[in-house]
Amino acid sequence: MKKFLMATSAIVALSMMPVSAMAETLVVGLDVDAGTLDPRQSRDSSANRVADLIYSGLVHITPGLEAVPDLAAGWESPDPQTVIFTLRPDLKFSDGSPLTAEDVVYTFTTLLDADFNAPQRALYAPISAIEAVDATTVKFSLSAPYAPLLSYLDIGIVSKALAESGHDLALNPVGAGPMKLSNWVRGSEIILEKNENFWGTAAAFDSVSFKVIGDNSARAQAFEAGDLDVIQSPLPPQDIERLRGDDRFGNVVIPGLGVTYVHFNVNDPLLADVKMRQAFSMLIDQETIVNDIYQKVDEVATSILLPSSWAYDPKIVQPAFDFDGAKALFAEAGWTDTNNDGFLDKDGAPLEVILSTHSEDTNRVQTVEFMQAMFEQAGVKAIAQITDWPSFSTNYVQQGKHQIAVLGWLNIVDPDRLMFAQLSTGGPTNWGGYSNAEVDKLLQDGRSTLDVAGRTAAYQAAATILAEELPYYIISAQGYQLFHSKDLPIEVQATPRGNLRGLIGLND
């Protein structure tokens, strides 16, 4: 039977035709391999998207960013600091073992355990206690009201019995989602098969094969050749433009829920000085990067707040490109060309920085190379360091070994998702060591205030400080692109998030 290949760097929901009209296997293309299939330890989009099929959370997040019941049949909040979930009856993991309130308690207890070092632990920090009232009732007690809580409760529930027995959920996941793991060849392919114990509507496919295809252009070329039926971002801008003009294909081009940004390591002695971060930021020509390198598939950002967010304020602006202004700031910090060789120096040492990103994304590679050229024109000795994603992310950025890195964040369903864990003092994904007590308070206020006006005020105040202190310089708000063959026997619906359940016939 025909197999359909689908790229997964953004999100697709596909409402499927009857199973009889579909192929038995859906083949999905990943730009990078999953790092782990334990949802509590996930650090990359591939892991999140595969885990979304293997596991189920208390809730599911729709394309409209609404939390709807998944394992939980419903919930109530008797007061602002209490949420009580009622599980569906007779839930089972894919191995046939029962899923109860104790598994929910175990999942969130481990997420909150500092020794477990879950990368998303900060998202659940306001949970002060989790209690299994009975086998199908879970009570969450909060230390303070927590506005974005439901947005984060789609994380997969794991089996307490398996985890405590030493079962390796990272390599051999067992969840309660619509699919289960069949085989995983690291760096090459992840094969899932239908979970016959799934509580909901059965998947439309017997199996899903995730193929790791790191070259974005290769996916576009295979799609044009008819070998693939659906591809989605990240894609090279020239391929996006060409495919949009090809009437053989359907397309969806919409704003995404991600940003491309420059991450300054403020623990680095050179970058600890805010004037240096400001100067380097003023050498980032956003207009050229977005309009020429990304060919306008993204939107020039003005601050850390997405234009699509309810918290956005166009009056909050980070520094714009200003070549002469950057050189003036370098001079204020004592960096001048004493040797008349075109490069700045101070106390006998040259001004030198390392610009880094990962090799899988050619747009980011070009961005780093363009930044390198601009920096050198300003007298900075800039070294481009390009490595594969696992080395770049796990062994470099997440260890705080970078200086200036070009990265991205996806799945920004709430301002809290982009700011709290990343920019609060000691946050689990605060890899650059940024710390500001006022920002800490504002980000805490933003998550504990329940009214939108109060949350907006807190995030706008924090964004104003961040636009000046610049632990992040936001290059662009990402766009999302989906291309599909018009011959597909499915109705294609795109969503800018990251979940993949629509790929296998489960409506969102």
Image (cartoon, helix red, strand yellow):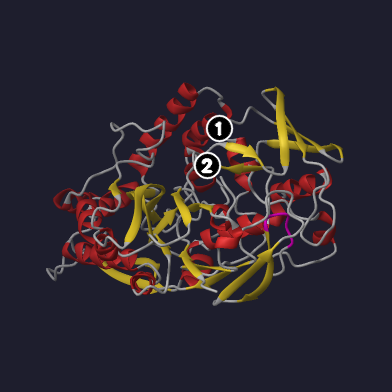
**Is 303 left or right of 212, judged from the image as shown?**
left
Residue displayed at 57% across by 42% down: 61
The answer to whether mark 1 and mark 2 are in CB contact below 8 A is: yes
As drawn, 458 above or below 155:
above
Q: Amino acid at mark 2?
A: Phe
Magenta span: chief secondary structure: loop
- Residue 176 is a magenta residue: yes
Residue 422, given in percent of the width and then of the height, sits at 50, 48
Q: Which residues are magenta?
A: 174-178
For the N terminus, which image quadrant? bottom right
- Label 2 Cα crowd, 10 Å radius (few <14 / some 14-19 / many 20+): many
Q: Nearer the viewer, residue 324 or 476?
A: 476
Residue displayed at 16% across by 64% down: 377
Residue corresponding to mark 2: 420
Residue displayed at 60% across by 71% down: 190
- Label 1 Cα crowd, 10 Å radius (few <14 / some 14-19 / many 20+): many
Q: Nearer the viewer, residue 471 or 189?
A: 189
Residue 23, given in percent of the width and then of the height, sits at 56, 67
Q: Secondary structure at mark 1?
A: helix
Residue 177, given in percent of the width and then of the height, sits at 69, 55
Upstream in the sequence, badge 1 or badge 2? 2
**Is 257 left or right of 399, judged from the image as shown?**
left
Q: Amino acid at mark 1?
A: Arg
Residue displayed at 33% across by 71% down: 224
